[in-house]
Image (cartoon, grey):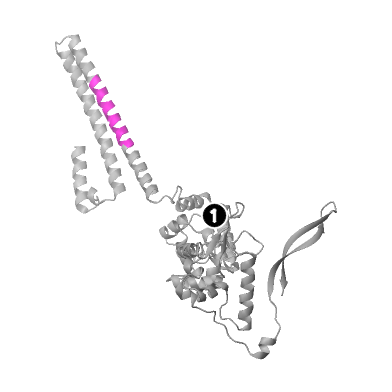
Amino acid sequence: MSRLYERNRYIKRKADGKIQPVAERSEREQRHQCKLWRANSKRSYKKRLAIAREAAAVQQLESSTCHQAASGKKRAKVNSAKLKRKCDSLQNELQTAKKLAEKWKKHYSRLESNPAAGSPSPKTVVQHVVRSGNKVVKRKLLFAATVEKQLKHNVSACTSERERQLHAKVISGRLMNHYLKKYNIGFMASKVISTHLRRKFCKQTSLQFEQMKRANSLNKVDTEAVTAFLEQDLNSCVAPGKKDCITKRQVKKQKRYLNSDLRKLYVEYLRSSDRHMSYSSFCRLRPFWLMKPRVSARDTCMCVKHVNMEFRVQKLRYLGVLDSKSTRELCDVMCCSSTSKKCMHSECATCQTKKLPVTVLTSEKANEQTHYQQWMSRTEQRQDRKKNPLTVKVTVKSKL
């Protein structure tokens, strides 16, 4: 009678809308209702089981079966119940292991896709700080405000591009760029670092200064071209001495001496190259082992005779008698080719008829006295360490 009354009361309340259907409830209420159903089901199952056991006991007493058969059936039921409980336990453990494996699998995939986002995240840290209390929150906010103020001061104090770049590299990176984009707070970082520099150096690994290069700046190709041009035997010669080597920045090279002036070599380089280059850049790209010849270095091709001839040509050029600036130009005028043996030894028919082009001076300039420099050898009397007289032969520059 009581069950019938409760059933009718439930139907009436459901019709009045006081009881909400399970499908229309929230997930939490649905889980709670399922929990109640499971508890009721277990209670009903235990009750039915108790009734069944009582019925079985009565039946056993009433039946005429032997004790061994009843005992065997009882053991079978117990074993069956044990196996069922064990299967249920293993099934629960398997489900727990699967959930745990799925959890760490997703965690690993997130870390693999974004290695910068480590654990814990800034959001998790903030949540822990908020739960810690007002005192901890206040300290964290004071620290953040102090750091932000110092960073603003550092930005305003940067005067050069090198300082601004170093400041941006110190406080920017992949991790910062990831979280600013994730939490949509990039506008707050614009006060301490520009968006352009933050995105530019988000993947940087070093703090070295990166200087911007112009589109027409000198590159490795220009350096190799100038080096190859100057190392040609027509433009330079190798120093023959074993000790004629030079080392710079742990790079050891044999010395080479230029055969002509850098200005003339620059003109020749522009003729043979398609790429334009200024004279200062050409001089700057000259390798350190390519040196200007010195008269004191007697093992070079610029010996005393060659230098004296060069002095004479320069003086005649100064007086206006010759148009050639050097002996090389003078040789090009008097010979068909400076690389031909017949032309250089006056065996060529064309070269034999050529004459030296000179400008006749006026009578006043022709009677004027002039002088030029020349290297000469002479002997001098000196003393050695023990103050004994010693005769030495030296080469000195003198005016004639």
Q: x, y (%) of residue 195?
A: 46, 66
Q: Is residue 135 magenta?
A: no
Q: Residue at x 79, y 62 (%)?
A: 380
Task: Examine the rendered structure and indicate whether residue 120 appears above or below residue 89.
Answer: below
Report whether residue 59 is seen.
yes
Q: Residue at position x 18%, y 17% from top? A: 58
Name the chief secondary structure element in magenta: helix
Residue in the image at 50% along x and 71% along y: 346
Q: Is residue 70 left or right of residue 198?
A: left
Q: Quadrant of the N terminus?
A: top left
Residue under pointer 1: 137
Instruction: Give the answer, above or below, for where 70 lies relative to 340.
Output: above
Which x, y percent locates residue 291? 59, 63
Where is the C terminus found, in terms of image quarters?
bottom right
Taking depth in this image into account, of 56 and 203 the one nearest to the observer is: 203
Residue 272: image x %, image y %? 44, 70
Tell me: residue 19, above or below residue 301. above
Q: Is residue 21 visible?
A: no
In this picture, residue 371 sits left or right of residue 390: left
Seen in the picture, residue 267 relative to 42 is either above or below; the reply is: below
Give the magenta-colored segment's residue range.
79-97
